[in-house]
Amino acid sequence: MIRKLTHIAMAIALLPGMAACGSGSKIEPQSSVALFDSFEYSGNDSFYKSNPLPDESSYYNPILAGWYSDPSICTNGEGDYFLVASSFTFFPGVPIFHSRDLVNWKQTGHVLTRPSQLVNMESQHVSGGIFAPDIAYNPANKTYYMVTTNVGAGNFFVKTQDPFGEWSDPIMLPEVAGIDPAFFFDEDGKGYIVNNDDAPDAKPEYPGHRTVRVVEFDPATDKCVGERKIVVDKGCRPEEKPIWCEGPHIYKVDGKYYLMTAEGGTSVNHSEVIYKGDTPFGPYVAWEGNPILTQRSLDWNRENPVTCAGHADLVQTPEGDWWGVFLGCRPVEGNKENLGRETFMLPVSWTEDGWPRFIENGAAVPLIASKPGVKRGEEVTFGNYTRTDQFTDSILGHEWMTLRGPASEYYSLSKNPGYLTLQCADVKSSDKAVLPYVCRRLNHHEFCCRTRVTFLPEHDAQAAGLLVLKDETHQYLLARTCRGDRHFVELRKISDAGSEVIGEQEVTPDLTTLDLKVDGKGLNYSFSFSGDSGSTWTNVADAVDAAFTTTDQAGGFTGTVVGPFATNSL
């Protein structure tokens, strides 16, 4: 299948200037629809420009920039690596990436591509839905498994023997309460599921008191068998009242079983700890040198900080080396950032007495790392790059998402070939519903998004344009609107207080095709439009507070997204 997305990827620096958006064709406005004929995203972070990669085996951290949280990784032992991340209420669910060398990653699709795999998404908060997926390979039956939590339905898994293709419908796990399930398949063919659950007898001694539990899993019947047992209560140092022992994984190395979990919550106190035992059920002994990964003790005022490091997963190469992926944040100031929790990768070393470690306590996560012997390709998932979509394919590219469902009733790539056709719908962007919205992640602190749209509003509540969204009540909408017989390009701030116009420029009714642009620079957005194909730009609002869409102010677990939106319900 030929995909429509044109990639211009540069790991080190963005070429000067930006390619012109749009196909240059002229189309007349259509009733109650917006016609988007192009979309361009350009990342231009200063760090990458000032710090070029030193050699062809180097890479930037994060390896997946932007909101790719809760990473999990597996290998089939034959040189193929697969990585998945959380998707929450976005559709399709659970992005999946493939690599042959751990440096050059390519998104090959999503694991959850059908509504039957993503039930009860409507009415959930943006940060509800699919939490912390785990991907595992069982060599005994040559099957890949992805297990996860749908907070609106419970824990379930899907499976396939072709990770590049379709996955099964969900197989529910009613015996596995709690969140963050992960598979472990032992050498004898037995399977196990480990996850985070309530305190013993559901009686926590303090807020954040949780347990890690293990149950045997039978791959032949796809069912859990036997007793589900608590293997960790509270955390690695119970006397310190650790919180949120979550995101667990089990590994077997040299006959010993290792249990790795996160601790400290997903914010700045996040960490990763390790235990060792003689069976999958333990008993597990925590390493005295824990944590094996954290950034919580470092100076907050350091340059280019990485915070919140944790929720890790390990993988071994055919050569016997160990590597790990984990989430982290790159704040601009304090805790403020719009990129969400990103995926980082580092080599994992082993102590003389047999304990794995990412970095020593007090060491900073490096933003430049290397995997010797690997040659970095031209198209990578890190650094500065430009992505341009002319909407000429019959399906959306892998970077695009909708909210809470496929939104096929709202958008089409076939009604007007070469255009993304969005139907204005009686849905507000703040509604917990499927939206007439097609979006992608922000991947850079410094970026430019621009789109060309043909649209003529027919009433005061109708609008179409670019929506920057963190959640239901933290949004900015740059849109073509009207009030009576007057027409505008306006910027609206959508908050828990409602929708407020914070910038506008009046335009003539015959300006039905225009370019819309949002520029991001750290904690500031600027919004503008052009009526002459980008030759000149008119400012709508400048120095707009980008901190409003950060997790620091909005809460939640996602990063910020941006994309075309149309509505009948301003």
Image (spheres, rainbow, N blue to C red):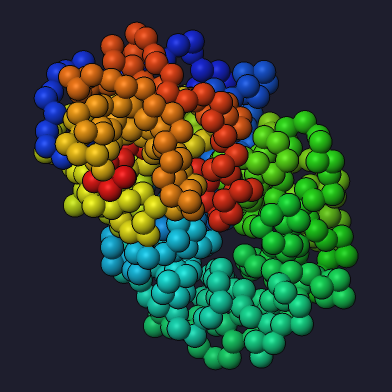
Q: Position of residue 220 (x, y in %)?
A: 40, 80
Observer able to see residue 70: yes
Which residue is pictured at 61% across the width and 48% down the height?
A: 553
Which residue is pictured at 46% across the width and 74% down the height?
A: 155
Q: Is residue 179 above or below residue 314?
A: below
Q: Position of residue 179 (x, y in %)?
A: 55, 72
Observer able to see residue 7: no
- In front of the other: 513 or 397: 513
Q: Quadrant of the C terminus?
A: top left
Q: Quadrant of the N terminus?
A: top left
Residue 276 occupies quadrant: bottom right
**Left or right: where 272 falls relative to 15:** right
Residue 489 occupies quadrant: top left
Q: Is residue 192 above or below residue 144?
A: below
> Of all residues shown, which one is farthest toward the front?
484
Q: Is residue 247 above or below residue 419?
A: below
Q: Is residue 299 above or below residue 185?
A: above
Which residue is pictured at 32% across the width and 22% down the height?
A: 506
**Left or right: where 36 falls relative to 450:** left
**Left or right: where 537 falls relative to 383:** left
Q: Position of residue 51 (x, y in %)?
A: 68, 21
Q: Position of residue 39 (x, y in %)?
A: 33, 28
- In front of the other: 479 or 49: 479
Which residue is pictured at 30% across the width and 27% down the height?
A: 488
Residue 458 occupies quadrant: top left
The number of discs equals 0
